[in-house]
Image (spheres, rainbow, N blue to C red):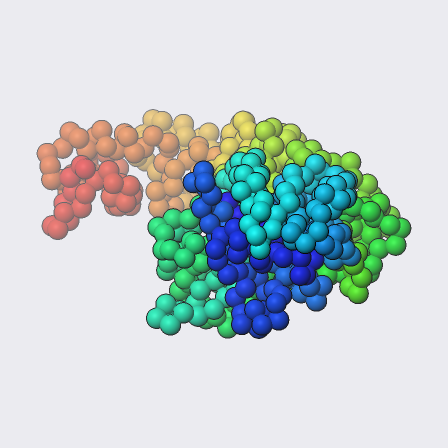
Amino acid sequence: MDVIATAGHVDHGKSALVRALTGMEPDRWAEERRRGLTIDLGFAWTALPSGRTVAVVDVPGHERFIGNMLAGIGSVPAALLVVAADDGWSAQTAEHVAVLDALGVRHALLAVTKSDLADPAPVLTDVRERLAATSMGEVPAVAVSALTGAGLPELTTALERLLTALPAPDPAAPVRLWIDRAFTIKGAGTVVTGTLAAGAVAPEDRLRLGDRDVVVRGVQSLGRPVQRAEATARVALNLRGVAVEEISRGDALLTPGAFRSTAELDVSLVGAVEDRLPGEAVVHAGSATVGARLRPLDGAVVRLRLETPLPLRVGDRLLVREPGTRRVLGADVRDVDPPELRRRGAARRRGAELAGQDGADGAVADLARRRFVRTADFTAMGWTVPGDADERGPWLLAPGLADALAARVPDVVTRYRTLRPLEPGPPVEVVRRALELPDVELVRALVRAPLALRDGRVVDAAAELPDAVQRAVDGVRARLAADPFAAPETPELAATGLGPRELAAAVRSGQLVRIAEAVYLAPGIEQLARARLAGLPAPFTVSQARQAWGTSRRVAVPLMEWLDARGVTVRLPDNTRRLR
């Protein structure tokens, strides 16, 4: 399906033209038909001769309903500009064209209506010349009469060409459906409508609405239930888990985690930016309308503070209107999570910085400024991950940052061990704070040989114990080399200077193994104990194991329990063991 929105002055025949094209009545309310003007959004659709289906969003032309008009155009990729041959270009036509230009609409078709009442040629020439200076450029144009049907075949052909030239939407993109209507259907519940500009939606999809999850019970497109609707499409979604009173025009249904709601953002204004900018403005995004305060940064770059957060991304085009005037400006979103501006001159520097960035350069500069950010958050802002970025688990690091931080880790370890020589290295949390990292998981990405992670610490595998402690440990290991199961007793260890702290340091360094309180043996004891038990008939008792090991009960009992805990031996109901 293709979607196009009408634009143009009230009473220039937009709704009549839609009726002639589709055979449907786009004005939804009796009040609209009674007054002969479109107050709210109307919708109609038809199949073109080629088989393409086009849905038309008929927007109000009266200046009092400009907010409704913007709600209809905001998510639509193309516009059908309607100008009457007997009236021509008007102030309201200029306002609607200014809106299309500010929104950056590049695909449009001009229909000069009421050609049965006046010569359309002068209007065709005049309007096309005016449009040539806008984002729409050279616009195809057709003279038409909804009353007589003259020009309708040519309009249909021009419409086919226009729709063929539209860029293909991405059905795999995340969904952001700006809601333009919400109502209740008896027996179904809450229903919302909108233009699906990207992505796809299907029954049982879970979407985010504000701070809650809602489930799509059913999907309709062009008045029919469908199993899946892909962009671009007009859709009606039956929602579970939300009442219609909780939904307003301008709310958005979102793919969970794919968008970031923001009330503060930096934008570049597009259009005739004068020296004076309003302090307050009305911002339109999709079908949403919110008040905002403007803070000039530098040139056309300003900071917007929205009264209500909106789910926006870098690259979005907004419309900024000055209240009480016809002045409208386009605004390209440059940053949805901008830095604070505290120091003198920070605003001007920030504006100049953004003015010098474009496209991929913006993503690189933003990542460099943040240093590290979760990849999901970075993409939710609208950035594309730079090719030379460093992805570590869920985190994204600026190019070269991991190497720079890794080079600082040895100094952190050295300083820590200088203050605590019996500890093998700092806990990972100490390293995280020293390097100002947001997550201890990032420490893993920064530990390089000869450093290693061991028991929640960053240790130097080559680091030595203090000289006196090392000599005492060497003496114990020499005794154990001669008699592996003859664990020295606590008084013997203390006499050599090995107290609880020194013994713990020796264990952390991998030079001793703690079997139990006051029982320390040499590394490799597990394999040696198993080898000697393998020579016993199974099952065997602790006493038989003690004899095979050639040690005392003080050592044998805790050693057997240690082997049980490590899965080397299995304890049977009668307290005998067997090897696993």
Residue 4: % across, % down: 56, 48
Residue 419: % across, % down: 64, 42
Asked whether residue 339 appears in the rendered view, the answer is: no
Residue 166: image quadrant is top right
**Residue farthest toward the right in the current orientation of the protein:** 275
Q: Which residue is more in the foreground, 261 or 333?
A: 333
Q: Is residue 470 above or below residue 42?
A: above
The residue sitting at 45% across, 46% down in the picture is 47
The residue sitting at 75% across, 41% down in the picture is 125
Pick the quarter of the image with the C terminus: top left
Residue 353: image quadrant is top right
Q: Which residue is more in the foreground, 7 or 221?
A: 7
Residue 132: % across, % down: 74, 39
Residue 199: % across, % down: 48, 45
The residue sitting at 62% across, 65% down in the picture is 37
Q: Is residue 293 above or below residue 113?
A: below
